Amino acid sequence: MRRILTFLICGAIVISAGRIKNTEIQRPIKIALATWPGYAHAFIAQEKGFFKQNGVEAELVLKKEYCESVELYRSGKVDGIFEVFTDSIFHNSEGSPTKVVCIMDYSNDEDVIVAGPNIDSILDLKEKPVGIAAINSFSHLFVLSALMKAGLKEENLRFEIVPAQQVPEAISEGRIAAGHTWEPAKSRALKKGCKVIAKAGDTPGLITDVLSFNLCTTEKRPGEIRAILKALFRAREFIRTNKVEAVSIMAKAEGMKPEEMIMGLDGIIQPDREQNMLMMKKNGNSNSLFNIATTIYDFYGKRGRYFSQEDLDNIIDSSFLE
């Protein structure tokens, strides 16, 4: 009788331990993202059950402003993040090992500099305040590149920290003359009489959005990351075959109007899996992440931020797409 009782107790412990272990494995992978059309298909994967159908639990953590989602990742509250490639490099240089596993999009007409009605060209911004998300951010790089390309010198520029979604109101209030923004704020700005005076496509590849995960997650849960990518590519296919429903899901999730989401999607280029694998290799393609990184290193190197281009081999990892 005692042997039988001991057997039952041990069996219960084993089953219990198995359940605990299984629960730990099934802990959702948390991914931070901000309001941005290029990330919105993740909500289709969630809404239509594509994550679960691929055997993975993914929890999307949406923030209105991009800087808020980056802070979530840096503080370790999420496992991955949809972000600008520039920040993926930053994480690694700041001691937070991060791997880029997929390119989400290249911004073309979606990231823009909008200016008030009294500004006719970029040259009119000399000595006037221009809104950027943060100093030494990808936003700073984009705006400075656009202004210098037009012939302005850095010493003749003034920058104000204004989150992208607050730019239209900041221009109306006279706090800035122009600013970097994207949908849905871009549409609001245009309705207020603002005009687009520069766009990301003027410097192709400069603003490239990616999906990144911390090193711990890539090493311990590679199969789940692959499942997430499968679900995301399936969501993109859903957009092509069910556009009205897809736009409705994405717009609702990100707090946009359907027409704003459509404009946002029209302003980006989203590479498929095969294009992704090509862009994540060392080659002569101008949109290769390795080539894009050259501009990033040059910009931040002049500002005292040290990076080693050799580190790119540890940052860019296309194996999850294979």
Image (cartoon, grey):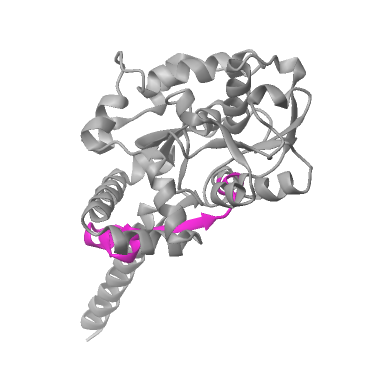
From the viewer's side, name the closer residue of 40 and 172. 172
| Residue 135 inside the magenta-drawn segment | no
Residue 26 in view here: no
The quarter of the picture where the N terminus appears is: bottom left
Task: Answer with left or right where residue 160 lies relative to residue 39.
Answer: right
The outermost residue toward the bottom is 1
**Residue 43's image quarter?**
bottom left
The quarter of the picture where the C terminus appears is: top left
Q: Position of residue 137 (x, y in %)?
A: 61, 31
Q: Number of callouts in the render?
A: 0
| Residue 52 inside the magenta-drawn segment | yes
Q: Position of residue 23 (x, y in %)?
A: 35, 65
**Residue 243's image quarter?**
bottom left
Q: Position of residue 91 (x, y in %)?
A: 54, 33
Residue ID at (47%, 22%) = 203
Q: Position of residue 75 (x, y in %)?
A: 59, 46
Query: Vertically, is 185 above or below 198?
Result: below
From the viewer's side, name the closer residue of 112 and 280. 112
Query: Vertically, is 23 above or below 30?
Result: below
Residue 126 in view here: yes
Task: Answer with left or right where residue 213 lies relative to residue 50.
Answer: right
Residue ID at (57%, 46%) = 66
Magenta highlight range:
44-69
